[in-house]
Image: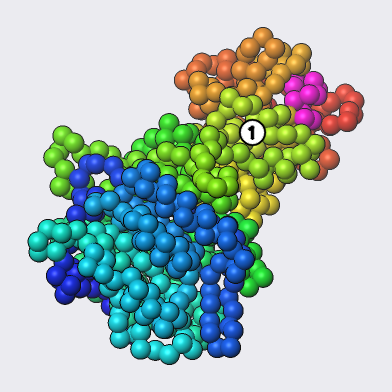
Amino acid sequence: MASTFEGIDKFLSEKGLSLPDLEVLKPDANLYKTLAYQPKGIAIAENNDGKIFIGNSKDGHESSLKLEAFFDLAVEKNVHLALTPEYSCPWVVLKRIIADGKAPTNDALWIIGCESILPSELKKFINDTESNDIKIICEEDLLENDDTGFFDPICYMFNAEDSNGNKKLVITIQFKTHVMGNNFQLEGDNLIRGKRRYIIRNSNSSIYLVTLICSGCFDFDTDQDVLNFNNQPYLIFHPQLNLEPRNINFRKYRSDIYSQYIDPKKEIICLNWAQGSKILDREIVLSCSSIFVKSEATTNKVDLNRIIENDTLGLYYHYLVSRAGLFSFYPGEAVFYFESYKASINQAPPQFQKANRGPKMKGIYKWRDPKWETNPEVKNEYLEEYLKEEFGSGINNYFPNNVSLLNRERLLALSTGEIIDKEWTHPTKNELFKVNEDEFYSRIALFEDPKTEQKKKNLVAKYDALINAYLKNPEIFPDDSQLIDLKEGCSIHYDNENLETNVISKDGIPACVVYVGEVDSAKAKALKGLLVDNLSRKGSQIQKRVLILRRNREDVEPIYSTDAPAVSENSEKSEVSFKKTHD
């Protein structure tokens, strides 16, 4: 039986408390600030004489230091929402921050994924923690289970008021409702499943927030009347400790939401452990922590400057084919600080309503013992390492520092012919930014995605061949073309003023030279026609400075335009042989 959703107001009322007024749930035009922790570590899952534990390794003193420093930063930044993933926070840290008075401000919410806990341990935590100023809500009947089973909980921390206006710290504990199954049998055999999930809301007309703990998304039944899912704006938090976060069972609810609703006002934050974390001797190869936003400004009218700024700080834009923006986080260990538009702004006056352009990264923090320190820029370490190992050159020899990550994707797509749309420079029309329902990333900014690794290696190899073999060979430029000035020397050049050209001569004249590899001739000619059409607004001369290089067995065939007589064969065989096709 699927778990039920119930409004938090019912349980607050039972304790004489009123609903809080959380900033993140106000449907207005104000932005809200979020701090999210993506930990890297060894998570253990063990059974000691029938006592189950899942969480940080026992020697994980550093994990406690990092969590405490994370909450220090949440207080310092005065964020409206603080998030940690499943099984990440030791209970000793939760006890300590409560004792030290570290807590959300009156309009803020912290959602903390905690390590597993036994029923007797949780009863003791409640008895030791509750006071006149601290109230705890949970499914109390489940505490009567014996300690042969365990809970996988998240804790909502926020402030509420009693009838006299006194502030109370509320900790609402929600238990995981669905087991992982065969891949995590210890959990499957021993999890005490929750029967209730909370709807956090300011009022019936506010944005609603729900949390799906990892495999809790499997039984996410949006038809329950209390959810009013068709009409209500939602923020959905999906914390995980997950080796396979893009498995169809974990992403199906997202596909359903974004394919079934034209304007769903449903935003999703997925937060996993970092790449390189381990559990059950298996490694998380990609965290896939992401934010999903469906709006006109994250699909058709994306903010290019925001993409460039976010890229620098480890938040990468993709276009989900079910017409939503997918913003994936840098996969390594980090704390992410970002601001977002509300899931709905329907209560904002018309003059203050803004287009939802998706999240804006304000800072990324790396661990420098004993605290999280801001990092000015995220480096593409995996691509750098691959280029050095495979081709012997660093990334700056391929992509100059002044070329943004956005333009690196465009440059690579252009140089290798990864183009099928005349508006290919727009991220939503670019094959490297496109993400299908499988959520596999093709951007080289996420070169480490193993699901698309070979595709990106092939593109980089073609790009390397173009710049280090063909552009340096004068014979590549046919004598009957308008590209003969490139024989004297040329180099890669790319900027926002010339997105349709990628090469420049010694005299500063641009051109477009593309190496497509082994594709059929018709496809190469179609690509040439598309690129020529794109350049038509810049005049007839630049239109003739398009050269497509297609490998045809042992030869490379140039496809180009010319007004001169045809040259059908090379007179001699060189290191690179060329057959010539033109119009």
Looking at the image, residue 318 sits to the left or right of residue 503; the answer is left
Amino acid at dot 1: Ser
What secondary structure is found at the residue carrying circle 1?
A: helix
Placement of 371 over or under 502, stated as above or below: below
Is residue 24 toward the left or the right of residue 284 in the image? Answer: left
Q: Quadrant of residue 117?
A: bottom left
Percent across and percent down for residue 7 are 21, 69
For residue 131, which quarter of the picture? bottom left
Magenta region: 468-480
Q: Position of residue 262 (x, y in %)?
A: 29, 54
290 part of magenta stretch: no
For this rendering, which residue is in front, 503 or 350? 350
Q: Residue reaching furthest top? A: 507
Residue at the image point whose x is 80% and y is 20% from the top: 474
Quarter occupied by the N terminus? bottom left
Counting the numbered discs, the total is 1
Q: Left or right of 504: which side holds 302? A: left
The residue at the point 84 percent across, 40 percent down is 554
Q: Can residue 564 be seen here?
A: no
546 vs 109, nearest the viewer: 109
Q: Quadrant of residue 398?
A: top right
Of the 4 image quadrants, the one containing the C terminus is top right
- Where 246 falls versus 506 (above or below)? below
Q: Residue at x 45, y 68 (%)?
A: 91
Q: Position of residue 149 (x, y in %)?
A: 47, 86
Is-magenta flag for residue 469? Answer: yes
Q: Position of residue 471 (x, y in %)?
A: 75, 25
Camera-side residue: 372 or 469?
A: 372
Q: With 159 as the anchor, is 487 left or right in this view? A: right
What residue does disc 1 label? 415
Residue displayed at 59% across by 84% down: 48
